[in-house]
Amino acid sequence: MRYEDLYRRSIEQPEAFWAEAATAIDWNEPPRKILEYTQPPFRKWFAGGTTNLCHNAVDRHLAQRADQLALVAVSTETGVTREITYRELHREVNAFAAVLKRLGVGRGERVVIYMPNMAEAVFAMLACARIGAIHSVVFGGFAAHNLALRIDDARPRLLIAADAGSRGGKVIPYKPLVDQACAEAKFPPSKVLIVSRGLDAAQPRVEGRDEDYAALRAQVGDQEVPVEWLESNEPSYLLYTSGTTGKPKGVQRDVGGHAVALALSMRTVYDVGPGQVMFSTSDVGWAVGHSYNVYGPLLVGATSLLYEGLPVNPDPGIWWSLCEKYGVRTMFSSPTAVRVLKKHDVAYIRDHDLSKLHYLFLAGEPLDEPTAQWITNALGKPVIDNYWQTETGWPVLCLLPGVDMKPVKFGSPGLPNLGYRLRVIDETTGNEAAVGEKGVLVIEPPLPPGCMTTVWNDDARFLSSYFGHFRQLLYSSLDWAIRDKDGYTFILGRADDVINVAGHRLGTREIEESVSSHPAVAEAAVIGVHDELKGQVPVVFATLKRSDAGSAEAAAQMMRTVTEQLGAVARPSRVYVVNALPKTRSGKLLRRSLQALAEHRDPGDLSTLDDPNALEEVKRALERGADAGS
Ligand code: ATP
Ligand code: MG
């Protein structure tokens, strides 16, 4: 099958296409209508059909693969590896569901899960799905304030937390954070369930609120909890966007569309089927974690590898040794992680037998060419960039090696995924941008199955945030894009990262790419800073590969590189060489904070900041003055 034919069918005959895709999952009652689209842009996929994610991810595999591994949870933080078969997964998920019921959790109620990458996080998610409760996983690295914000938006009946997380061997007790968040929240949960791994012994209990999972697990024993059949469009989970650009939005996902889209993508994009192994290095707290650490692989009867720990611990070969040991077929990671590995000897990769590994997929942020080139050379396998958002839940732009493998073009996440009507639109005129011309990437509704159904409790915000940008009803990705003659799309950065220099609109990402192409540069962040004369000017913050390299000289060369590649208009006004750049816990640059600091404003909400030192670095650099420019 050719990609072009399949794609065309998904666009021209969406109902036939998705009806066929829907046969990949079990339905208790088949859909009455494949697509109900009476209230654009809201849409209902598989209306009237009833199904259950837990049944599809667990129960239905028992007949054929009960003794096959479903989940391998490896922690280099605790030194524990758990190999869990589908039979064991079924037992543990049922027990967890029984505990949830005992705590009074019912269909449609929210459960916040605040846990690192440990097996019980997966059990908890699937247990919620089983009984029709709506889970909302909050990344374990988030601080109490972040947790409180999400609690108040989701208003959970129950909060499930690990006793502690661990990062690079440093134990981070969660209980104090949970207590703090519950104190700060206006709508704290009435029950808190602690899953203890014995990492934090000193845990004062709040009487009447706190429960211990092990104790309840022992009480409920092994019992089967019946699956709650849900209408396809009922909410399955909430997940808050990472908040790089503002207040996080509670992305709401459905049941049937979500299952069908993930099952399809496992086959067509990630090329993983029953009995094969997928290793996503994401955290269960992110969209990738939901889709490709938990639901996707399990929906198709594959084995999912879940990893807790640093990519360099005990040494930078750890991921590849896991690939070798478990025969990983498809690996999924992020450019940030690869940039970490790139600082180490390539032998850490090459010394492993990776004959079973077919692909490495990378997503979440722009994949710069030097990084893509390095990892491609090191692995000798296709490295596939794929572009998506928490909102979409599965790739928007990608290559589909499970259908037919198109050539990789560095710098581009590839072609429109099945079911996505993508356009690149001129921001001001709303007209289609020509080939090679920059515009905003938009999706023509109805959004395909798997994409968000709305913002939790806030249809108005769903409409204004995503559909209010153009005269026509279009979902705006808020990302800049450009399409080449072969239909490959290149992402040029966020629409709100655009700066206006003397009337010229420049994407900061383009300037970043240009700065990064200088051999001395490790990473660069470009922001627009207010300027009396020009409106805004580009300002560069860059880290160097070698800390002993001459900053002033490198900075001056960066300016020259940009001028040569993009023209004088894009020439950075100032270049600051720093030791670290401020990033979120998901590895994204916090440009808005950089910009605020450079304009002597308050850096704003820093609760998603990964390393506070990076911000101090920037402040010091600003005080010290630029390494080039003025
Ligand atoms: P928020 O919407 O709350 O500000 P966020 O956009 O950072 O947070 P995510 O949904 O995790 O949260 O990230 C999606 C964004 O990440 C995309 O809109 C895009 O800007 C960027 N992105 C993801 N994958 C890629 C990719 N392959 N290439 C370039 N950019 C990417
Ligand atoms: Mg976003």
Image: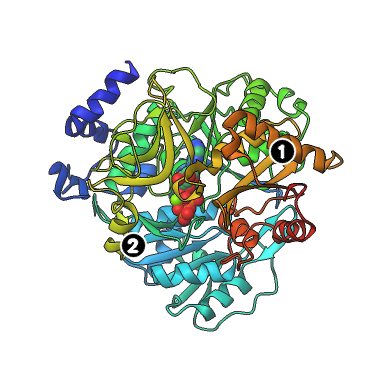
Q: Does residue 152 appear to the left or right of 334 in the view shown?
A: left
Residue at x 26%, y 56% (from the top left corner)? 234
- Left or right? Give the position of 32 relative to 183: left
**Which one is nearer the viewer's eye here, 575 or 265?**
575
Report the amino acid beneath label 1: Ala
Residue furthest to the right:
548
- The label shown at residue 522 is 1
Quadrant of res 373:
top right
Q: Residue flagged by tag 2: what amino acid is it?
A: Trp
Question: Is any part of residue 331 visible from this angle?
Answer: yes
Q: Is residue 430 above or below residue 413?
A: below
Q: Position of residue 138 (x, y in %)?
A: 50, 60
Q: Position of residue 136 (x, y in %)?
A: 43, 60
Number of numbered tags placed on the structure image: 2
Query: Can you tell which of label 1 and label 2 is closer to the viewer?
Result: 1
Q: Taking 483 as reference, is 163 above or below it?
A: below
Q: 184 and 95: which one is in front? A: 184
Which color mode does the image show?
Answer: rainbow
Say which of 512 and 215 sits in front.
512
Numbered mark located on residue 456 in the image:
2
Disc 1 versus disc 2: distance between alpha carbons? Answer: 39 Å
Quadrant where the image shows the N terminus: top left
